[in-house]
Image (cartoon, rainbow, N blue to C red):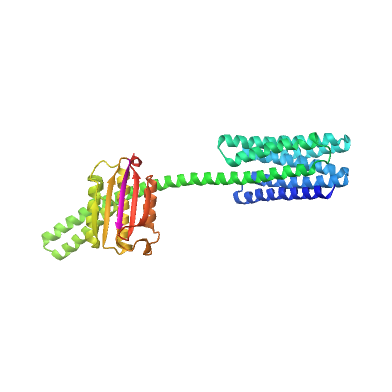
Amino acid sequence: MTYEPAVALLFQMLCTLALAAVHLGLWRQRRQPFHATWAAAWVVYAVRIALIAAYLQQREIGWLFAHQVVTLWSGLLLLWAALQFALGARWRPVFLAVPAIAVGWAAFTVFVVHDMATAGLSSALLLSAVTLGTGLVFWRRNQIARSTGARVLAWAFLLWGLHHLDYPLLRAQGSGVLLGVFMDVTLLVLVAVGTLTLVLGDERTALAQRTVELEHLSGLLLRAQEEERRRIARELHDEAGQTLTALKIQLDLEGRRDVSAHVAEVLGRIRDVSELLRPRALDDLGLAPALRAHVEDFSRRTRIEVSLELDESTGWPPEVALTLYRVAQEALTNVARHSGARHAWVRLARRRDEGRLVVEDDGRGMLGGLEPNLGLLGMRERVGAAGGTLKLETAGAGGLRVEALVPLGSGA
């Protein structure tokens, strides 16, 4: 064998080992058994290429026998990897008989029949059948779930399966090595690209599915949170509130004005907490009255003037009303805690297919050291769970502008 074919075969062997390394890395990351099997198959295939080079160089029958055995083994490993990928097949000890049969068949064709054509044809047919079968596995995968990686792998293995018939049927022994190596390396690159594309597609699909699951879980947690807030608010108002009211009346009757005043202060705080947990006005009167009551209470407690522009229409879907109310509540809390503002604006508008809430202030804004906090994250999560969008940007007065858009259909 001349220098050029030897270098070409060495390059093909290195490319095959690189593909084996890709599958080994994927196996270490994902722990899926078919990646480990494919890695082993490509390592054995690389050994096959080395044995081809040795046989073409020395023409000794021992190299031919070893080449035939390793060729059959690589084909069997490729077949097993395809079965693991397509069917989730599991290993059984009885399968060890198959590589033993492959050794026997190679010994028979090489040492008994002494027919190079028969030996080469049998191994080429096996490799071709296995490679074509692998291509069909990926073709079916693409039909079940559209995937660019599966399409690339399907075409690569189908073409490679036809190419395996090239050596024994269309060329003389040892001829056209450079052309064959070029085709093999090209197909190896396609297989590597298709494998990585398929894996990335699977990861993207899994990530999208996980995102949907997390959004669903977030919605359930928000509903559970609101139910718990409703329960606590009701108990505070009905149980503790009524008890403290009765105590205050009794103290007033006994003339103990100082103690009665303290009880009244505690009672007021309990009512404030109850309203923060679950505003009764939101359930009884609707979104606009609840926002007006909250803004009035906010201005009284913080001394920050708030201008209101409210859509007084009724019939807001409950989930939408609750989402917009909580966004206004949290946005005003951020105004009081972080902005240093003197004035704020709250605007509520209802369009045909969505509700729009805007809260802005004249404080420090996003340049004033605003960092993501649980309140902002909670607003974004709540609006996202309702199918809407939340925007944070600089307000016209220099402060922070919070805009929530929630589709009205999300309340159904």
Q: Tell me where residue 118 sits by quadrant.
A: top right
Instruction: Report if residue 354 lies within the magenta region.
Output: yes
Instruction: Report if residue 119 lies within the magenta region.
Output: no
Magenta residue span: 353-360
Q: Eyeballing the image, is 31 above or below 83?
A: below
Of the pair 43 and 87, the residue shown nearer to us: 43
On screen, residue 142 versus residue 283, left or right, reads right
Q: How many marks?
A: 0
Residue 411 image point, x, y percent:
33, 41
On screen, residue 323 versus residue 137, left or right, reads left
x 63%, y 49%: residue = 27
x 67%, y 46%: residue = 189
Residue 344 image point, x, y percent:
27, 58
The answer to whether residue 160 is seen in the rendering is yes
Residue 147 image point, x, y percent:
57, 40
Of the pair 97 and 23, the residue shown nearer to us: 23
x 85%, y 45%: residue = 56
Is most of the magenta stretch helix, strand or loop? strand
